[in-house]
Image: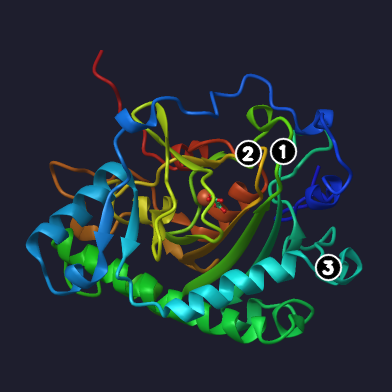
Amino acid sequence: MAMHGTSLLVPSVQELVKQPITKVPEQYLQPNQDLVVVCNTTSLPKVPVINLHKLLSNDTIELENFDHACREWGFFQLINHGVNTLLVENMKKGVEQFFNLPIDEKKKYWQTPNDMQGFGQLFVVSDEQKLEWQDMFYINTLPLDSRHPHLIPSIPKPFRDHLETYCLELKQLAFTIIGRMEKTLKIKTNELVEFFEDAIHQGMRINYYPPCPQPEHVIGVSPHSDMGALTILLQANDVEGLQIRKDGQWISVQPLPNAFVINIGDMLEILTNGIYRSIEHRGTVNSKKERISIATFHRLQMSSVIGPTPSLITAERPALFKTISVADYINRYLSRQLDGKSNLDNVKIKVEMDK
Ligand SMILES: O=C(O)CCC(=O)C(=O)O
Ligand SMILES: [Fe+2]
């Protein structure tokens, strides 16, 4: 078993595919996987696209679309988001170069048995467990004292500077989006934002999925909902692979130029008393091209307590979730394999069913 809040160390998949292989090692083969290749994609509904500029100008239709996306999809693509295009391009380049550093250089940033930050995989809790077809790099970016000296401060420039600016801009963007939710939920200004003001935690997970000779038998990232409040994801090299579960089907989130994929995590589902939803998603891989994504997570810090915000608890809509300690939620989430939405189900208040 892995220690609390850590992940067992696993080999690098990026290194593994440096030898030509036609078969995937046993530990990556997923039995009984739902169809990864989604047929007939044209007839499936598309993830909503939201224009932030319109949203901020109080465009009524855009506000409605945004509200609908948060209630029904838990996911949307955000365009006109205002984050500098050059900065985003520099991040993409920087990430690619960082993953292409020689392995001996990368070892300096590797996870250790006591630390899930760095290169590796997350949620590996037993030696028998199936592994994912990816290498990832995870770092805490905020608060500043959650950073480790051998990680961000040791990343080569100029990538380090771009990363710092990107994190700041994305934090601002997260506050802006959560602020818009107060409007569409018709609650007081700051009622959601204030939970985050002194207690925001930001983390970044860079996912690198190498090409795979048997893509339909492996998974890049197992089905899960995100633990935090709001995730801002960049599909960094425009390769398809992210899929979300909608009405029992897996729907692909096709990369859109200059867009971020935004998704609501478990903590916002709890805070909004289940009105805005944290949706299950997964990362698939393909045989031809590597895929890179950068997920930036925003959540409450460990010392916080979380429950449905009082004005969203009404007679018609009683509290759906218990009020719990964030530390308990996180520790539980991190100590298990990813498993759909099971963590959130665990804090649901069980309603007595009529016989
Ligand atoms: O690579 C992706 O598009 C999804 C990654 C993801 O879901 C995550 O890092 O939480
Ligand atoms: Fe995710």
> Given the current orientation, which residue lies at the most extreme front position?
288
**Residue 229 spot, x, y in % from top left:** 42, 59
List the residue tagged with mark 1. 212
- 58 over 221 or under it: above or below: below
Q: Amino acid at mark 1?
A: Cys
Which residue appears at 74% of the width and 80% of the height?
Answer: 155
Residue annotated with mark 3: 106
User: What's the distance in space between the residues labelled 3 and 2, CA to CA?
Assistant: 24 Å
Q: Earlier in the sequence, mark 1 or mark 3?
A: 3
The reply, left or right, for residue 291 in relation to residue 3 is: left
Sequence-first disc among 2 and 1? 1
Q: Secondary structure at mark 3?
A: helix
Measured as percent of width and height from the top left, residue 146 is found at 65, 76
Disc ID at residue 286: 2
Q: Which one is earlier in the sequence, the residue at label 3 or at label 2?
A: 3
Contact between marks 2 and 1 (CB within 8 A): the answer is yes
